Amino acid sequence: SKILELVQSSGERKAKAEKFITKFARVYTPSVFGVGVVYTLLYGLISKAWTQAIFGGLAILVVSCPCAIVISVPLAFFAGIGLASKRGVVIKGANYLDSLCKIGTVFLDKTGTLTYGNFEVAEVVTKGVSEKEFMEALLAAESRSDHPIAKAICLHQNVSKIALNQKKYTEFAGLGVSTEYNGHTILAGNVDLLLNNKIKAEEVDVSGTAVYVAKDKKFIGYVVLKDVVRDKAKILIKKLSDLGIKTVLLSGDKLSTVKEVAEAVGIQEYHAKLLPQDKTKFVEEAIAKRDSKHLIAFAGDGINDTPSIIRSDVGFAMGGIGSDMAVENADVVIMQDHPLKIYDSIQIAKKTKRVAIFNIVFSLLIKLTVITLILFGLLGEASMLVAILADTGLTVLMTLNSLLLIYRKID
């Protein structure tokens, strides 16, 4: 229901072309009306053929009607949003279609964006406690979290009773969680969470994501989880590169894991062990350096990505596994969690803009040509017929051109 509401309200946010047409019509309509009046008076006074003068003036008014532009251009943007919806992409306003055409750099989150976010526990290592005690502490800490890693740890585990017994449960963005369970203080997250709380723990070099656990200020072990890179993530990076768009990977994971994913998908620049504020800082620095023709986009899925999604010029959220916060604040929502849809949305925006510009230029060219022919008296008695065709006929033609956008294919 929220997504439907977003689609319905998207029409309220107008693109620059739509705003231009509104302002253009305010100037254009009275101007051509004046041309028609002046033509009628001059032709009538000079030739004394007032009937022909009036019909010629009326023909100018008919052909000058801006319906073809005023109707077809907004319709093109509605059709573009409709095409995106068919492709599983919710664009929250026509104004974002303009922004999508100007993207120069895309910052990408790793977990849930370039990877499936479906973690699997690959290894459990305990330190001085039994595996049962370790897992009880780990499940207590992760039982109330919505993070993909927490969901993977709690998968197939009955954690409802454990979740109810949590006290002072706190999530630390980009670090992990803290809770009190059965009189014990438990921390679970990355190694920095433990070090920040003055708990001795050494970072392990493993292939995957490690979650470290401490109980009552003592390090009791870690669990290793592995994620899988999405099938078409590499194709996305290649297609964006072909469009001249730079891609940068930002992640809170350790360097070796981030590097492995970056190399797998073909991203040259990547940064690891970032907190949410660190990701936002990268986005802000890029925005400070960019020009108006090369906007900054950010794609993520979690609540930790929300500040960067909001701060970027264009924010993408993975709507399937993404947090409500990310989806609410994004400009574009990818409903199927398919990263290649980022490329699709950019291509749809470019096609939409091309159709809108074509409708404007073609309509004005036809109208100016017919007005010129009428002014020089080259159409004779057929001037009104041609004027009607250049108005109503052109409006129908441009409207069809806009509507056909819904059936366009995305390369």
Image (cartoon, rainbow, N blue to C red):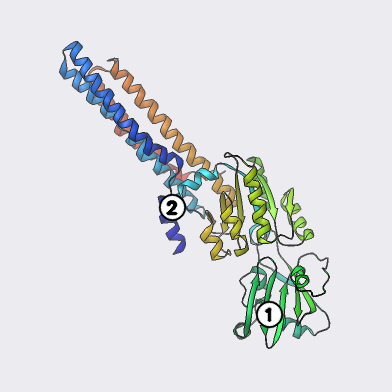
Which residue is disc 1 drawn over? Answer: 139
Label 2 Cα neighbours within 10 Å, binned few <14 / some 14-19 / many ≥20? some
Q: Residue at x 23, y 21 (%)?
A: 56
**Which of the 4 image quadrants contains residue 115?**
bottom right
Q: As shown in the figure, which amino acid type bears the numbered disc 1?
A: Leu
Q: As shown in the figure, which amino acid type bears the numbered disc 2?
A: Ser
Label 1 Cα neighbours within 10 Å, binned few <14 / some 14-19 / many ≥20? many
Q: Is residue 399 above or below residue 233?
A: above
Observer able to see residue 389? no
The x and y percentages for residue 120 are 71, 70
**Which of the 4 image quadrants contains residue 64?**
top left
Q: In the structure shown, which secondary structural element does the residue marked by tag 2 occupy?
A: helix
The x and y percentages for residue 141 are 68, 78
Q: Residue at x 70, y 68 (%)?
A: 175
Observer able to see residue 342? yes
Q: Is residue 208 above or below residue 42?
A: below
Which residue is disc 2 drawn over? Answer: 10
The x and y percentages for residue 239 are 64, 45
Tell me the distance, in whole angstroms, between the alpha carbons under discs 2 and 1: 41 Å
Looking at marks 2 and 1 on the same chain, the residue that comes earlier in the sequence is marked by 2
Q: Is residue 60 above or below residue 19?
A: above
Q: Residue at x 42, y 47 (%)?
A: 78
Q: Pick the quarter of the image with the N terminus.
A: bottom left
- Judging depth in this view, the residue of 170 and 145 nearest the camera is 170
The x and y percentages for residue 248 are 69, 50
